[in-house]
Each structure stands twice: as C-alpha cells, then as structure tokens.
C-alpha cells in the first residue's frame, strides 16, 4: 500500500539499514540527513510494486565509493537529486519511481530526497537486501547484459575542486568501472542514478519489499532499546533469524583504500572466548573464517559487527580493543534478487579478496 514516509520512518530506516549495511552501506549521520531533509521539504511516498504499471520507468538511486571514511569525500543531498535529473534528461522521459541498489546505514534512504523534490516514488524493492561493494551486485542481473543503458553521477568534495557530474551510455559492466573512477576523482564517494528499466523487469528481478524489510527491523530495534543492549541484540536475531557467531575483542584491523577502484579492502580479527575469527572486508563484511581457515559465513549472508550496546558499527569505525558481537544471518532467511544469482558479478570480488565467494552465493538455498 502507498504511504507517506515520516520522521519516525527515518529512524527505523537508519537503524534497520545499519544492520543490513554489513559494515558498509554509508553512514548513519548521512542517512538521517537525507531522510530528515526529505520528510521536511516534501512528502516522499513508499509504493509497493504491485501498485505500479508494468510499463512505468524505474531507475536505481545509489551512492558509489568507499564507505570506510578513509578519504576526503563530500555528499550533499541535492547531489542525489541532480543525478536523477540528469538521468531523466538523458532518457527523455520522466521516471515514475526509484529503487535502491542495497540497504545500508544511509543507502536505504537514497531515493527519499529525489522523491520529495521531484515527485518520483520510493519503490519498495531493492537490488540486494544487504549492502555489497560493487554497483553490478545490485543491478538486477543487468551486469551481464550487452544492451546499453544510462548511468549518471553527481557530487564531490567542493573545497578541493573535486565536484563533478557525468552521464554515461553503454552496457552496465563497461560503465561500472567508470563510475568507480568518478567516485575516486570526486573524493571517494559520489551520488548516482542508473539503469532505467520498466517496472515489469523490476518485479521479476528485485528483492520485493526490501525497504519495508529494513523498516520493520528498525522498528523492532527501537521497541527493544528501552530494555537495554541484550534486548536489542535479541530483537535483531529474532527479527532476522540470525545468530551471534562470536562475541569478543577486535585484536587487529587492516583496512586500506584502493585508488581508482574506490574500495576499502582489508581484514578484521576478533578474538572470542573459544576461537578467533577473521572478517574479510571489501567495503562490506564479505566473509568470515576461523583462525584455522574454516568458512563460517559468506556473502550474501548478512554479516554485521555490533558494538556492546547492540548498535551496528562500520568497518571504518571499528577500532582495536573494541568489544563487539559478530552477527550472521544465513541467506535462506531473506529474499534474494537476480543481482545475487548473477555469476558475472563475483570475479572482481574474488580477485580483490583472494577468496571464493560465488560457490556459496550461487548454491541453491
């Protein structure tokens, strides 16, 4: 059902999205800024896809870059609006609505401000329930398509003369590296709008209800907060059918920004009472191994570090000595889009991490 999003929904989106951010997915401060601007200056409307005509034009609102805070980035809310306006101009037709490529600390709210300013609808569907490192991983199976599409970017660090805008035409897989190069040139993080498609395609390939999924999780977290950290963690696990793999102290962290490709890549070691685990990071937490090399979790599982108070913490803000809980939600407990089942999106991730990911991601549930 259609409904206008509210200030209360902003908090639910940030809290739920932060769990699904899996150590990346932007910043909660940025999410609150985007959401509060949207619900203050306009009336962003959340719409279920079953209410949308099959021929309506829908595109993906996203942010591209490295969310670890290791670069000099700047993202203003109107950058998202500018990216959408550029795509509509290139398409020559108005967009009915926007989906998001992934849930996250701020990415769950990427479509809200354009909705408030331009009147596009916030479509209740996502390219991936959880956050991921590459645009292709949220492209609804279009990464392998040879057909040309439109992708735009806008934003950048103004004080260093790094603001830029660009519109690209071409196959998704060819354009995605150019978008990452633009993110790097802008300071490490940039707004984008990409891949205009009809609603019928989105209905077949997206994770439907993905925004509502994040909002419901955030609502469960908010309800549990007055009862303390244990209640919050229990609520997260109950809502998502998740488990805590290990509770312990961060003993090592290596996280580096990769020039030109705009990824944060590294490893985080957590010492638990019974075993140490290593979390492999490529913007997001992508895999967990025991000290002996046993695989304990792999994308698209939700893999999230929670602070002692139950609040999710990003890879960039993890510090050695911090006490954390490592959450895992197996992939069978949430909707998987065609993005996840597209084998062409995994080689760059596997090469960057030096790990097998596709074998698990593509295995039947």
Image: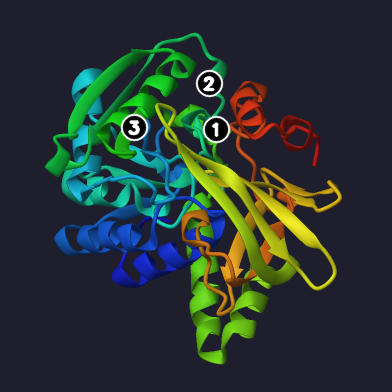
Image position, residue 99 (x, y; %): 41, 41
> Which coloring applies here?
rainbow
Determine whether, in the image, residue 284 is placed left or right of residue 317: right
Residue 137: assigned label: 1
Left or right: 289 as drawn, with respect to 80: right
The residue lying at 47 percent from left, 61 percent from top is 317
Give me the C-alpha separation between circle 2 and circle 3.
21 Å
Q: Earlier in the sequence, mark 3 or mark 1?
A: 1
Residue depicted at 53% across the width and 21% down the height: 143
Left or right, 350 with respect to 363, comes to left
Secondary structure found at label 1: helix
Along the polypeptide, which appears first: circle 2 or circle 3? 2
- For the N terminus, the image quarter is bottom left
Q: Disc 3 and disc 1: Cα gap in Å?
A: 19 Å
Disc 2 designates what residue? Answer: 143
Mark 2 in CB contact with mark 3 (< 8 angstroms): no
Query: Disc 3 marks which residue?
Result: 184
User: For numbered disc 3, what is the local secondary structure?
Assistant: helix
The mark total stands at 3
């Amino acid at each position: 059902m259609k409904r206008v999003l509210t200030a209360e929904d902003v908090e639910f989106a940030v809290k739920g999205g932060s769990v699904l951010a899996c150590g990346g997915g932007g910043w909660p401060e940025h999410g609150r800024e985007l959401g509060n601007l949207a619900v203050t200056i306009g009336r962003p409307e959340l719409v279920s896809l079953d209410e949308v005509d099959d021929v309506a034009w829908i595109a993906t609102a996203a942010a591209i870059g490295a969310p670890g805070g290791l670069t000099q980035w700047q993202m203003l809310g109107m950058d998202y609006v500018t990216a959408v306006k550029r795509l509509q101009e290139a398409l020559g037709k108005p967009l009915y609505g926007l989906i998001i490529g992934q849930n996250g600390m701020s990415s769950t709210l990427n479509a809200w401000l354009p909705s408030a300013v331009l009147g596009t609808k916030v479509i209740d569907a996502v390219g991936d329930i959880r956050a991921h490192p590459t645009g292709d991983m949220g492209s609804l199976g279009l990464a392998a398509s040879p057909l040309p599409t439109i992708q735009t970017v806008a934003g950048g660090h103004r004080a260093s003369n790094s603001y830029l805008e660009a519109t690209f035409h071409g196959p998704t897989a060819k354009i995605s590296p150019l978008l990452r190069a633009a993110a790097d040139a802008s300071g490490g993080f940039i707004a984008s709008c990409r891949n205009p498609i009809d609603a019928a395609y989105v209905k077949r390939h997206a994770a439907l209800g993905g925004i509502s999924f994040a909002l419901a999780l955030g609502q469960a977290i908010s309800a549990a907060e007055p009862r303390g950290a244990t209640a919050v963690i229990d609520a997260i696990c109950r809502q998502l059918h998740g488990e805590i793999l290990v509770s312990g102290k961060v003993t090592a962290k290596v996280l580096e920004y990769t020039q030109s490709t705009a990824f944060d890549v590294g490893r985080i070691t957590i010492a638990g009472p019974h075993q140490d685990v290593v979390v492999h990071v490529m913007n997001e937490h992508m895999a967990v191994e025991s000290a002996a090399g046993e695989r304990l979790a792999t994308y698209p599982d939700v893999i999230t570090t929670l602070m002692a108070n139950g609040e999710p913490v990003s890879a960039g803000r993890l510090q050695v000595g911090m006490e954390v809980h490592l959450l895992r939600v197996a992939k069978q407990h949430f909707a998987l889009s065609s993005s996840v089942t597209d084998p062409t999106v995994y080689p760059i991730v596997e090469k960057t991490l030096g790990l097998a990911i596709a074998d698990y991601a593509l295995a039947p549930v």
